[in-house]
Amino acid sequence: MEEVDVIVIGAGPSGCVAAAHLARQGRRVMILEKQVFPRFVIGESLLPRSMEHWEETGLLPALTEQGYAPKLGARFIRGEHEGIDLQFDDNFTTGWTRTWQAPRAHFDKVAADATAAQGVDIRYGISAEDVDLSREDRVRVTARDGSGALEVEGRFLIDSSGYGGTLVKLLGLRDDRSPNPRMAVYTHVRERDRDAWPEPMQITFEVMAVDLWFWVIPFSDGTTSLGFVGDPRHFDPFTPERPRTEAWRAMVDRSVRFRERFVDQTPLWDPHVLHDYTHYNEKLYGRNYVLTGNCAGFLDPVFSSGVMLATESGLLAAKLTERVLQGEAVDWERAYSDHIRWGAAVFRSYIDGWYNGDLQTIFFSPRVEPKVKQQIISVLAGYVWDRKNPFVARHDRILRQLAELLNGTSGARDQAAVLNAG
């Protein structure tokens, strides 16, 4: 039996941010991580909002030293149309205006090492098999690795174990799967002659249909992440009989902008295929535990919200846990669930607006006013709690209103009316 103040399950971004914050408050923290780092995981395009979390927890210097490719914004293109180039320094909300494009295997290992350097005890290759919440003020976790079982007790448990969630399985928590039918297929390539292409390091999203898009995320180590996301009807090359690398090339061959650049690039591994990935956990907390990151829910990769929501929830959960450890009563519904669900709801509106075409209408319209663009950029930089921004405060209807105007003959006055509407 080992005793700590807080047990964290999962050493990804959410778990590391939570553990690092608590360690900086003088708490004894142990992370139980099922895998051995480095390990591959998707979610390689970050958002500026997370930079605040790395900075506040002391992890930023170690990450900055790595020389990851800077992400200053994102470009959305469709066919021969340039669409919109969103630059984070042209935003509405005060905050960070840059972040990184980073291979997560390397990135997460650096973050975990920096967390351990702050005094957090990280145990790799160990899986939580049982959680005992029967005692009012203690949590006991039984975990196992190749050499046997470990029992650890703490005053609080933060589950940052990622998609699927350890506590979701062990406690039988309700995890609602979204009815969205989308699928994703992705891999990495090592580019030859990258510098021969214009803007070779620009992160780009190519719209191939209203409900199909192609991501291109170049990394500073010479590799590039590529992925398709959309309705399954677009993925007919992926049949059980056909080799995945062959099916992948058939998909790349459909690209207008990137076919020549990538069609002959050999994938570094067989493309991964994901189905029905969107989910929401019904309740994000319980007595002596809280869910953070992807085990609390995951939306869609289109606007790279996953890591930002993971670090936001991890840091907030750690701050509230510290208050619990100090003997305060915490209203987890108001202070935690309401906050995280609001941010997810804002992003969900933009994801829905993307796949129903409203946001694409906005992105590819030449008549979007500069102030409108700035406010949308702030949302896509992760500043989804700034309710002074009408594209946050009225996220559930403003995209449809603006798209309808742009499909007509709107001018600056009409767009101003949308922004100022109650």
Image (cartoon, grey):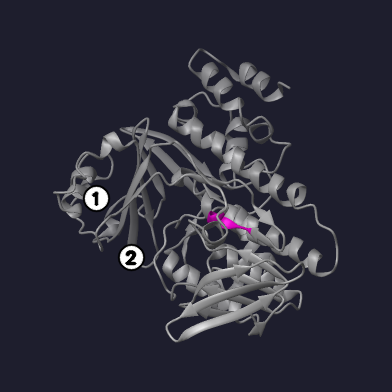
The relative height of residue 191 versus residue 377 in the rendered view (above or below) is below
Q: Amino acid at mark 2?
A: Gly
Q: Secondary structure at mark 2?
A: loop
Q: Which residue is disc 1 drawn over?
A: 261
Task: Tell how many labels.
Answer: 2
Q: Residues within 10 Å of mark 2 (few under 14, many from 20)?
A: few
> Is 257 displayed left or right of 277 in the figure?
left
Location of residue 388 (image quadrant): top right
Where does residue 297 sit, x and y in percent of width and height?
Answer: 54, 49
Label 1 and label 2: CA atoms lie apart by 14 Å
User: Mostly what secondary structure, the magenta segment?
Assistant: helix
Where does residue 92 sit, x and y in percent of width and height?
Answer: 66, 40
Where does residue 208 sit, x and y in percent of width and height?
Answer: 31, 35
The relative height of residue 275 versus residue 22 in the rendered view (above or below) is above
Any mark on residue 222, and which? 2
> Is 261 displayed left or right of 137 in the figure?
left
Which residue, as the protein is rendered here, is positioned at the far left?
241
Any mark on residue 147, and which? none
Q: Amino acid at mark 1?
A: Arg
> Is 204 displayed left or right of 411 in the figure?
left
User: Which stretch is magenta?
Assistant: 291-295
